[in-house]
Image (cartoon, helix red, strand yellow):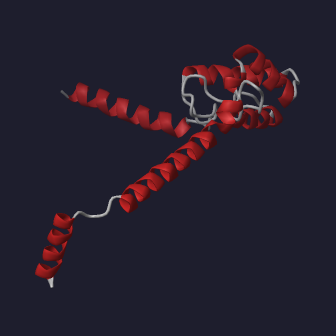
């Protein structure tokens, strides 16, 4: 019994000492300029798995792989534009978080505005038709009599 207690105590103290000796995690790349470039590009590029997150926000394995690839390209001395061009050539414009305005992305850029305008136009047409129908069909004598009865009851 005493031996078991000693082993448990030793194990607990070793865990405490392990935390005391822990050091702050170092950057994967010592070069601060490369890390700044990786961070900047990670905020401009989209995670191909998450689709609505940047590489910087994503915790997916593919996002980590892309960040490593960007880090390797940046360590080779490639500029931001060269790295983005390389990734676009490999994965297409979808990898950009803000795709450029081209003939293939026109619908992406202007589609929401077109749908909004179509919705407003449809609402306007519907309200005009409803207004015309209300103006064109006056109340019949029976309906007018019922309305006057209801109004007289309330007052």
Q: Is 48 on the left or on the right of 44, as rendered?
A: left
In the rendering, at what x and y percent does residue 132 appear? 43, 57
Q: Is 59 on the left or on the right of 74, as rendered?
A: left
In the rendering, at what x and y percent does residue 10 appear? 36, 31
Q: Is residue 10 above or below residue 140?
A: above
Place residue 45 in its image quadrant: top right
Would residue 31 be visible to someone looking at this image? yes
Q: Quadrant of the C terminus?
A: bottom left
Would residue 45 be visible to someone looking at this image? no
Q: Is residue 120 above or below residue 49?
A: below
Residue extending farthest to the left is: 153
Residue extending farthest to the bottom is: 155
Q: Is residue 26 above or below residue 76?
A: below
Which one is in front, 40 or 91?
91
Q: How many circles with numbers are drawn on the protein?
A: 0
Place residue 118 in its image quadrant: top right
- Residue for point 42% across, 59% down: 131
Place residue 31 in its image quadrant: top right
Which one is in front, 101 or 1?
101
In the rendering, at what x and y percent does residue 5 appear? 25, 31
Q: Quadrant of the N terminus?
A: top left
Which one is in front, 67 or 84?
84
In the rendering, at what x and y percent does residue 153 appear? 11, 80
Which one is in front, 145 or 122?
145
Residue extending farthest to the front is: 141
- Residue for point 69% across, 22% down: 68
Residue extending farthest to the top is: 90
- Residue for point 58% across, 34% down: 53
């Amino acid at each position: 019994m005493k031996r078991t207690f000693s082993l448990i105590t030793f194990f607990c103290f070793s865990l405490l000492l392990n935390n005391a000796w822990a050091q702050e995690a170092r950057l994967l790349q010592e070069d601060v300029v490369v890390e700044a470039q990786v961070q900047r590009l990670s905020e401009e590029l989209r995670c191909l798995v998450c689709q609505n997150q940047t590489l910087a926000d994503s915790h997916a394995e593919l996002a980590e792989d892309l960040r490593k690839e960007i880090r390797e390209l940046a360590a080779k001395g490639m500029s931001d534009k060269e790295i983005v061009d390389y990734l676009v050539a490999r994965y297409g414009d979808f990898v950009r978080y803000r795709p450029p305005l081209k003939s293939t992305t026109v619908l992406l850029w202007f589609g929401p505005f077109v749908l909004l305008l179509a919705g407003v136009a449809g609402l306007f047409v519907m309200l005009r038709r409803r207004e015309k129908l209300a103006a064109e069909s006056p109340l019949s004598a029976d309906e007018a009599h019922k309305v006057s009865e209801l109004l007289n009851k309330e007052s």
